[in-house]
Amino acid sequence: MSKLQVNNLVRSATFFQHAGISIVFVFMPIIAKGVTDSIFEIGLLVASFSFAQILSEIYFGRHSDKKGTRLKFIRIGFVGCAIAFGLHYFADDITIFFLVRIAAGIASGIMIPAMIAYTYEANIDKKRAATVISFHALGWLAGIAAAGIASDLKLIFLISAASFIIGLIFTIKLPNPVQKKEIIPGTTKQVILKNKFLFLSLLLRHIGAAAVWTILPIMIVEKLGG
């Protein structure tokens, strides 16, 4: 299989991966408002997904390094996300929402680091890796647009699950190269320390973005009649 074909498959999988995440993420505050009036609880509910995701990414990202394979984690993540995001459909109280959001965070965290690493490793000259990763943003755009078109806070969960299933299908034809196993202890700590200012800037950026996207959807609906 040519590099172009591999990149196109990864682009497609990446697109549906992030479309599936975004279609729920942006509308989660509005959905949460239906089961609780507490802004604090809504904030915790939104944060629970991200907290579970970052822990999952650290653990499974490092685990994929040790195994030297990415595709297994990518496929497991897609299956897990299809199930976890689909289960949102049945959530009808704050406790169940917390459980399914944490499950969704863990499932998405399994595949995201592996997908990024796979993209980078599949491009020896690294020139096309950025174009593949840019499909993250395109997926978010499509997911948000799909949620708006659906205009149904239950239906979007089914669309999200379907997005992950489609993404999984695109991974079936992907080659499964085995990379050099990274088994040296302390690698994660070394990477964080070496790039601490980069990580700090990204942290601050995402804190600001998450704060806005947690409150803005509620404000639009309540204050502007969106």
Image (tube, helix red, strand yellow):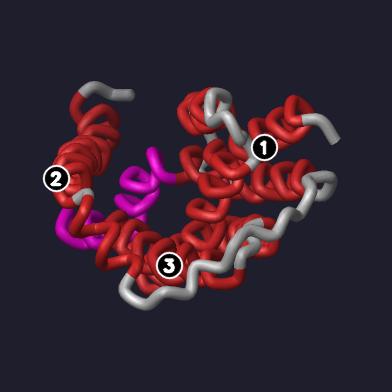
- Determine the image quadrant of residue 159: top right
Q: Is residue 34 left or right of residue 114?
A: left
Of 165 and 185, nearer the camera is 185
Residue under label 3: 56
Q: Amino acid at mark 2?
A: Phe
Local packing at callout 1 (Cα closer than 10 Å; few below 14, some 14-19, many 20+) is many
Using the rendered image of the protein, determine whether residue 148 is visible from the camera's viewpoint.
no
> Residue shown at 34%/59% (left/top)?
35
Read off the magenta span.
25-44
> Residue shown at 37%/77% (left/top)?
185
Of 20 and 159, nearer the camera is 20
- Location of residue 175 with respect to 47 vertically, above or below: above
Local packing at callout 2 (Cα closer than 10 Å; few below 14, some 14-19, many 20+) is few
**Sooner in the amino-acid sequence: mark 2 or mark 1:** 1
Q: Residue 191: percent from the left, percent from the top?
A: 29, 58
Work out which quarter of the rendered image holds the N terminus and state it: top right
User: Cα distance, mark 2 to mark 1?
Assistant: 30 Å
* Disc 2 element: helix
